[in-house]
Image (cartoon, grey):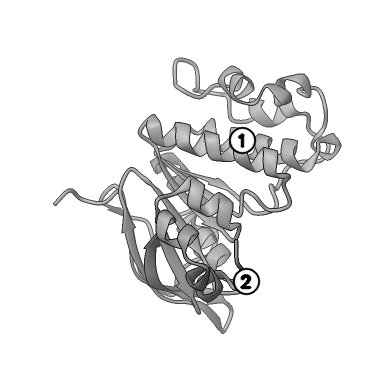
Amino acid sequence: MIDPLLEVVGLRAGYGTSQVLDGVDFSMGRESVAIIGRNGVGKTTLCKTLMGLIRPSGGDITFKGDPLAKSTPERIARKGMAYVPQGRRLFPSLTVDEHLAMLAKGTRGRRWTPEAVYDLFPRLGERRKNGGAELSGGEQQMLSVGRALLLNAELLVMDEPSEGLAPKIVDTLIDVVQQLIGEGHAVLVVEQNLHAATHMAHRQLVMVSGRIEAESTAEELRASPELQRQYLGVEA
């Protein structure tokens, strides 16, 4: 059996005395995987714990065979994991160019450079002199994704990437994820948007009360209103 790229075993984490993750278990290879679930089940907490922004209280995170549960965000990024956070987390006063320039060092000759990001998102190229606060929601999300790509990571973790976006922009992000998978990257997508989740990933992991409680496929989920109600509380 091929060793997984990312393996999470018994992961527990939370905020102060409030435990949110209650023994998360899953693994993935070089593929696209979606973690779905209703609000408040721990999806964002999982992302932050994987990226070292929250220190786990128990369990293990293994990435490319190395333990990461006690690592800093900087070490995790150097190891090959990049993060597109919920809410984009851009600097309002910095231009698009300046956001990308912060991560441009060392990208020459690699797959993702600032110019490659502009090729991927031509709209950003048109807005490169505009500040983060002057961008639309879709443009901000493009910049957040582009910034993460400049790390040339092997695994991209995306937290609610479709949140608040128009359907056309969501379809653009779906195309980007599919392109990344075609190039051999791995993508872990946390989503509530049924269309986005099932078009960004074949494997669908269902989170309930801080644990992964079920696994489905994009095809099964799209075809079953009952599963949609059960897992997300909505219908297509």
Disc 2 versus disc 1: nearer the observer: 1
Give the position of the C terminus as an image quadrant: bottom right
One can see residue 118 in this view: yes
Residue 39 is marked as: 2
What's the distance in space between the residues labelled 2 and 1, CA to CA? 24 Å
Q: Position of residue 226 (x, y in %)?
A: 50, 73
Pick the front one: 207 or 10: 207
The residue carrying pointer 2 sits among few (fewer than 14), some (14 to 19) or many (20 or more) residues within 10 Å by Cα, namely: few
Secondary structure found at label 1: helix
Single out the residue that lies furthest toward the left. 1
Q: Picture coordinates of residue 58 (x, y %)?
A: 39, 74
Q: Nearer the viewer, residue 178 or 44?
A: 178
Give above or below for 105 relative to 68: above
Mark 1: few/some/many CA within 10 Å (<14, 14-19, 20+): some
| In the image: residue 118, left or right of residue 95 | left
- Is the residue under label 1 in contact with that under label 2 (CB below 8 Å)? no
Q: From the viewer's perspective, is 99 left or right of 26?
A: right
* Residue that badge 1 annotates: 172
| Amino acid identity at mark 1 | Thr
Residue 71 visible within the image? no
